[in-house]
Structures are given as structure tokens and as C-alpha cells.
Amino acid sequence: CQRQDGRPSKQRLLVVANRLPVSAIRRGEDSWQLEVSAGGLVTALLGLKEFDAKWIGWAGVNVPDEVGQRALTNALAEKRCIPIFLDEEMVHQYYNGYCNNILWPLFHYLGIPQEDRLATTRSFQSQFDAYKKANQMFAEVVKEHYKEGDVVWCHDYHLMFLPKYLKEYNNKMKVGWFLHTPFPSSEIHRMLPSRSELLRSVLAADLVGFHTYDYARHFVSACTRILGLEGTPEGVEDQGKLTRVAAFPIGIDYERFIRALELPQVQNHMKELKQRFAGRKVMLGVDRLDMIKGIPQKILAFEKFLEENPHWRDRVVLLQIAVPTRTDVPEYQKLTSQVHEIVGRINGKFGTLTAVPIHHLDRSLDFHALCALYAITDVALVTSLRDGMNLVSYEFVACQASNKGVLILSEFAGAAQSLGAGAILVNPWNVTEVAASISYALEMPADEREKRHQHNFKHVTTHTSQEWAATFVSELNDTIVEAQLRTRQ
Ligand code: ADQ
């Protein structure tokens, strides 16, 4: 691909994900305010600077009228975003239903929520139909914007049918699919009534990527056990067609964090926080308020730690920042009340007139405030019950160059495979073990903290989000070359 001045132009990339990296707020009939939204995929893809990338996805709002749709499309074009318009019923069936009530909990080994089991079984077919329809709508918009030579990168469990629909339209299109969640054991995947169709649709892609080798292996096993296909060291083979399957562990744009820490306002905020918590060690949790993040389990482990270590009671504080997500889903509302109830009880039990042991915030923090918090933290607690990777653990490490704080990390987060040697790994279901790890982390000698930090810092600074994206796209290009070579032979 050459520009007129002879220099190679950037690789054109269509990134297709359920959500656009911006939230849209309507300010008038034809005026919109756009805000960049938080989230793992957003953070990683913000680092995609070597590509001429456009995003295709849902803007997270219902826009029934044409005037509004046109105005939003124009506003988003400036941010290189192309919207998909989903109506309320579609969001209910496809997004809240099939994606978030069925695939999300199942892929995180949480099964289907107890009270939804029968309802889910009854409404399964309509939700599945809506899922396919939504994937078709995404495919239509990709087709409209696709130009020969573009690479199409589909993201996540919301879009498992997209590779199949795109390849049916144009078999030469370069299509990759990446899963941000874990891919579960084939024994879990086979519970899905639509297990085979989902696998076959993903296999239509040229390259299928996961965060860890284990997830890739689970996917290949599901294809061999459920579809009877052949697994090879490169991927899955079906009648001579190879779908390459591999691990591409995501990273972060660590320089963005390091630069932020040098800003005067961030330095000032760090000073204020240090004064505010003077004399106490700071422990930190930053999560979306989701059942996979193990927030109640984390707080219960902290309670056990306080019970067993009275000498720490007024010398440590846990700051838990939880961004509410999927607030219209009853399971998530219940989780919020559960967390509030536990925090209230513990603060009542161990608080004094001047201090409480847990500060819990139900909201998102802006980037600079988050960096300051990461930097002054002594112990970060990431206790996900399952997590595809977990970028919070990476962000914490990136901000700890001076403090050398300790990371307590769930063995069920993908990050355990990369940061495991520097972190204290725990089973988040075992509150006794987590409580003991808190004690160990708080009392860890400086030389051990330094060694553990250096190990993780090296990993975070050598495995960036930019490199992750570049590796995936370059492998995707190579895969196509291989496929074309095979066709020519
Ligand atoms: P998430 O489940 O969203 O991502 P994670 O990887 O931890 O989880 O990323 C969360 C992002 O949101 C981080 O960048 C963090 O800074 C930000 N964030 C979280 N809470 C915040 C708060 N209170 N205020 C401000 N920002 C906040 C999914 C998968 C993960 C996978 C990523 C990327 O579930 O396992 O690592 O995608 O693939």
C-alpha cells in the first residue's frame, strides 16, 4: 500500500466491537455530546497509532428518529467512529439477554443466574435469534465501509457470528476475531444449545485470538470434541481450511500513565491523598461492578484480615472504586446492594468516630485521579473470580515505579500468567488465603517488594497494547498470504 509520495500509507483497519469507544449524550434534536468511555478494550485500542483505524459499533443509546441518527453519525465521524443503531427490544434481547445473561456468565464459569435459568431456557430462542440479527446488522455496516485491502478485526463474545457473515459476503476479506473474556473449558461451552453454530461461525475467521494459551487450548478442544474437527499446533482444520488459533496477551499504553504521573496536578493530588491517609497503608481495588470481579469476596477477605490482625485496624484503609455497569440488569442491582450492605457492616464494626476502614465509591474516576491513586497505593487487590486478562493490574504496576507496592492477584485472571511471578497469587474464593496474603503484602520487606515490582514492571513495559494490536494484525495479514498460497498450489 503506497501513498503518492512513495511512503507506505498506514494499514487500514476496521475495528468492530459491540460498543464504540465513546458515549453519546443527546443535547438537542440534532446535537450530541461525545465522551470517551472507560473499559478494557477502549484502553487497549486507544494505543493503536500505527493504523488508519475506524471503529464500528453501538453508541450505547437508543436513537429512534432519523434526524438524531444523522446528527450522531456526523458527530461520530470526527472521532473516526461509525454507529450501529439498535432499538430497545434488540438491546434487551441481544445485549442484555444473550450476551450478558448467557454468554458472559457462562464464559466466566458462573453458570446462568439461578432465577434466570427457567426464564432463560424459555426465552433462549428469541434471544439467540436477536443475537444473530444484531450480528447481521453489524455485518451490513462493515460491508458498507469495507474497501479492498482493509483488515477487519472483530471483537469479543458479542460478535461470534460476524466472521461467518463477513466471509459469506466476501471470502477474500481479511477477518480476525479476538475474545476479551476467557474461553471456558469445552465442558462448559457444550452446555450452550447453540454451541456448534457459535464455534463454526468463529472458525470462519482467518485468525482467532485469545489472551492466554489456556483459552486458545479450550477453544481448540471445543472444536475437536463438539464439532469433531482436527486440532493442529496452528489451530483448527476443517476439510483443508485452517483457522489459525493463537494467544495474543493484551497490554497497556504504559507511557500514558508514566507521563500523567509527571503532571503537576497529578503530583498535587498524590500529595493530598498521602496527607489524607497519613499513618495508614493504602489498599486499592478498581473494578467494574460485575460479579466476575469478586468484589464481595474481596471485602469479606479484608474483614477477616481485620478480625485476625487487630494491630492493623487503624493503620490500613481499603479504597474500593467500582464503576457501575449494566445498571438495568437485576443481578447487577442486587450485587450493588450486597456490596453496600457488607461495606456498611464492616465499617460499623471496625470504624471509629474519625476513620472508617473501607471507602467504597460507586463511580468512575477520571484518568488523572486514577493514576494518582495507583501511585500512592501500597497494596492493590485484584480478586476476579475469572477475568480474561485484567488491565487494572497492569495499570497499577505501571504507576508504581517509586512506591514499589505489592499486587495481590487472582489466579483466575489471565494476568496471573504474565504477572504471576511478581504478584502474590490467590484463590479469590478462599477468604482465609486472601486475608493471609494481605497480611503478608503489608509486612513484606522492601527488597522483596522491589524484586517483585521489577519483574512485573519489565513485563508491563515490554508488552504494550500497541504491540498487541500490531502483532495481531500482522499475523492476520500473514495468515491470508498462507491461505492464498494454498489456494494457488
Ligand atoms: P474489563 O472487564 O472492563 O475488560 P479490565 O481489563 O480490568 O476489565 O479493564 C478495565 C478498564 O476500565 C481499566 O482500564 C480501568 O482503568 C478502567 N476502570 C475500571 N474501573 C474504573 C473506575 N472506577 N474508574 C475509572 N476507570 C476504571 C475486558 C475483560 C478483561 C480484559 C479487557 C481487555 O473483562 O479481562 O483485560 O477486556 O481485553
Image (tube, grey):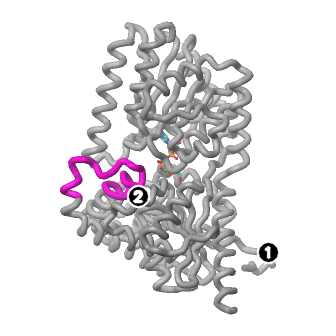
Q: Amino acid at mark 1?
A: Arg
Does the CB distance between marks 1 and 2 fall below 8 Å?
no
Residue at the limit of the structure toward the bottom, as seen here: 488
Q: Residue at x 38, y 43 (%)?
A: 290
Q: Which residues are magenta?
A: 100-120
Q: Residue at x 55, y 35 (%)?
A: 409
Density class for disc 2 (Cα within 10 Å; few <14, some 14-19, many ≥20) is: few
Residue 112 in magenta? yes
Residue 76 visible: no
365 up-or-down from 48: above or below: above
Considering depth in this image, is 114 or 21 the residue closer to the camera? Answer: 114
For residue 429, which quarter of the picture?
top left
Coordinates of residue 41 in the picture (x, y in percent) = 52, 54
> Of helix, strand and loop, which mostly describes the magenta segment?
helix
For residue 358, which quarter of the picture?
top left
The C terminus: image quadrant: bottom right
Disc number placed over residue 71 in the picture, else none: none
Mark 1 residue element: loop
Q: Residue at x 51, y 21 (%)?
A: 436
Residue 277 in magenta? no
> In the drawing, does residue 448 fall left or right of residue 128?
right
Q: How many marks?
A: 2
137 up-or-down from 210: above or below: below
Considering depth in this image, is 268 or 29 the residue closer to the camera? Answer: 268
Density class for disc 1 (Cα within 10 Å; few <14, some 14-19, many ≥20) is: few
Q: Which residue is mark 2?
A: 187
Considering depth in this image, is 165 or 111 the residue closer to the camera? Answer: 111
Q: Residue at x 81, y 78 (%)?
A: 6
156 up-or-down from 306: above or below: below
Q: Which residue is mark 1?
A: 7
Query: Within 8 Å: ligand 1 and the Cβ of disc 2?
Result: no
- Closer to the chain start, of discs 1 and 2, is 1
